[in-house]
Amino acid sequence: MPQTPPFPGAFPTSGYNKNLYQTKEEAYGGLYYHDNSLVSGSLEALIQHLVPTVDYYPDRTYIFTFLLSSRLFIHPHELMSKVRQLCVEQQRLSDPQADKTRLRKIAPKVLQLLTEWTETFPYDFRDERMMRSLKELTHRLASGDELYRKAVQQVTQGLIRKLTALSQYEEALAKINATLTDRLAVLKAKPQSIQRDVLSLCSDPFTLAQQLTHIELVRARSYPERLTVSSYRDSPPLDTLRVKSGNLQTYVEWFNRLSYLVATEICMAVKKKHRARVIEFFIDVARECFNIGNFNSLMAIISGMNMSPVSRLKKTWGKVKTAKFDILEHQMDPSSNFYNYRTALRGANQRSITAHSSREKIVIPFFSLLIKDIYFLNEGCANRLPSGHVNFEKFWELAKQVSEFMTWRQVECPFERDRKILQYLLTAPVFSEDALCLASYESEGPENTMEKDRWKSLRSSLLNRV
């Protein structure tokens, strides 16, 4: 079977171009084009447009865009059922006397569509109803021809491998979270080394940035792109999106964990000189993340250093050379809708497109902002036009953003894995917000009455837990 090609260049700036079968497509009715671009259509016509015939196969960008956005209007298992029904009825697959020549022409196209669906949206097939429809359709295609039986086996086996890998990843995350829970320690009256500090494990900023990139790419590959759309099916408030799926929540939790780990490493250092050294180390790590193209880790590190328990350590910061940190903060400045970051992201993307090595291809966007962009794109444009037709112009843009992310996440991390560092980054205990505040006050005493009262309250509260 032919393989689904990578996505770079799949969404040209000139818009979607209909394929050679334009006249045939328009004969179905219910589809509307403007300047050679599909702009709207009834849901039924769009579904019909997805289904191959002997003389027609849908454009790959259309397949991806429709499969991604259709879940706003119809559940995947319902769509699969309609696709199966159309294939069976149009190609007379239920007729035992069906023309074998015709079957040989249509079967590869239907199998290719199923291949693209199972490879791009494997999570859809965790639904038993999806699997039933898939098995029924592939059984009809494979009946009576050994060649197609083997092709069906390839599709099924590929899907099983993907689903198994996703399950194994989720199980691994559960084990990591369990280990982390077991290892969490309570901060006592005086900040102590409840763990080895990061500098004792890795003193090279580039190495740490490389290991952070490993973690980011693994999480990016596990994130189901369908959730960038299905999370918004009922248009929930933005702050509720993170609980829509385990994978989305895991990505957000990783960002928060890295931020708290940075703050913990700084605040748990007893001596001012060591705290300053840790801050400078993380500034260098953040700079290396920027150079690599790992913007998500970069933003998490900056976020950790800007947490109030860290930012209030004025004596410590007085010993830090902050010029490099100021440049990084400027790059990730949220003003003007993150203009500086978006400029840097475009530069990284251009480097990735022309790259000759895996290292130059790395682009890891600031994930929370990516999700917000897609959310506001969804909120800012209607799903349906006043005519009741699906607003497909909106979904071309949505698919363009999601496919770009899919391209970035396909890059294999070129850096050597360091298991000890990875284990530390994923499972080292981090202080709670209260523990961070107490550690900060213990390092540099309270400066006013409010801070003193807060300090006394925290000491009393945390000591009572021991």
Image (cartoon, rainbow, N blue to C red):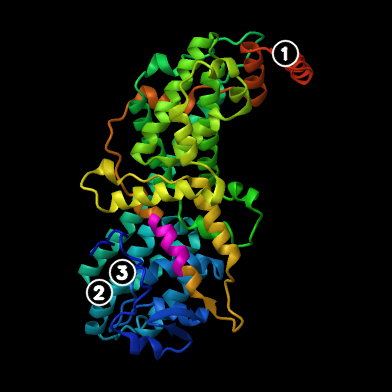
Residue in view at x 41 percent, y 39 percent? 216
Q: Which amino acid does label 1 sit on?
A: Arg
Q: What element carries label 1?
A: helix
> Which residue does the numbered mark 2 point to in the structure image?
144
Whether 266 is drawn above or below 114: the answer is: above
Between 268 and 85, the one nearer to me in the picture = 268
Q: Residue at x 41, y 63 (%)?
A: 400
- Identify the residue at horizontal 42%, vertical 31% (top origin): 286
Q: How many C-alpha atoms fall within 10 Å of the one at disc 3: few (<14), some, or many (≥20)?
A: many
Q: Name the residue under label 3.
A: 111
Callout 1 environment at 10 Å: few (<14), some (14 to 19), or many (20+)?
Answer: many
Q: Which labelled disc corresponds to residue 459? A: 1
Question: Is residue 149 among the parts visible in the rendering?
Answer: yes
Horizontally, residue 378 falls left or right of residue 295, namely: right
Residue shown at the point (27%, 40%) measured from the top left: 359
x and y percent of residue 193 in the render? 53, 11
